[in-house]
Amino acid sequence: MALPGRSEHALGVALDISCGDGSPGGLEGIQDWLFENSWRFGFIRRYPPGKSALTGVDFEPWHYTYVGVDVATELRRTGECLEELAARLEVGRRRGRAAGLRPSCLLRVDFRSQPNTLSK
């Protein structure tokens, strides 16, 4: 759980999609559709299964984050999580290689320092 003021929700780039009673259960079909199609609209399942060691957050099938169509498409193509893509782009930048994505389309969020700070 993120500290108050240090979440993607506080930044205005994330949303949770759940049942009317507030629980995430019962939405398997909707969650499947979202996973299969959300990238087309620039959204990603932010905390995918099997990536908690990289994201620092357990699998949350209801949590979606807007990253833009370019980044969402690349994540869909590679199966990476956002942290993996950021690391790959950073390595490419250090080596002077173009990553195929505009540098401005990926923002890194550091929730551990100041609330709501973004750095490129």
Image (spheres, rainbow, N blue to C red):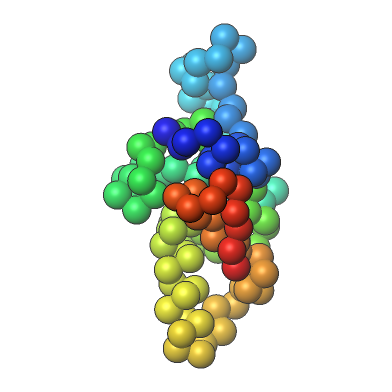
Can residue 89 be seen? yes
Q: Residue at x 55, y 78 (%)?
A: 99
* Quadrant into which the C terminus falls: bottom right
Judged from this view, the residue extending furthest toward the top is: 21
On the image, the x and y values in percent for residue 96 come to 51, 90
| Numbered-mark total | 0
Can residue 36 be seen? no
Q: Residue at x 45, y 50 (%)?
A: 112
**Nearest the eye: 64 or 57:** 57
Does residue 31 appear left or right of residue 91 in this picture? right
Q: Residue at x 60, y 58 (%)?
A: 118
On the image, the x and y values in percent for residue 49 come to 36, 42
* Quadrant into which the N terminus falls: top left
Relative vertical location of residue 35 with respect to residue 28 in this rendering, above or below: below
On the image, the x and y values in percent for residue 83 come to 44, 58
Where residue 16 sits, quadrant-wise, is top right
**Nearest the eye: 39 or 98:** 98
**Nearest the eye: 19 or 55:** 55
On the image, the x and y values in percent for residue 73 come to 59, 59
Relative vertical location of residue 23 with respect to residue 3 in this rendering, above or below: above
Judged from this view, the residue extending furthest toward the front is: 114
Q: Residue at x 42, y 43 (%)?
A: 48
Does residue 43 appear left or right of residue 53 in this picture? right
Does residue 53 appear left or right of residue 42 in this picture? left
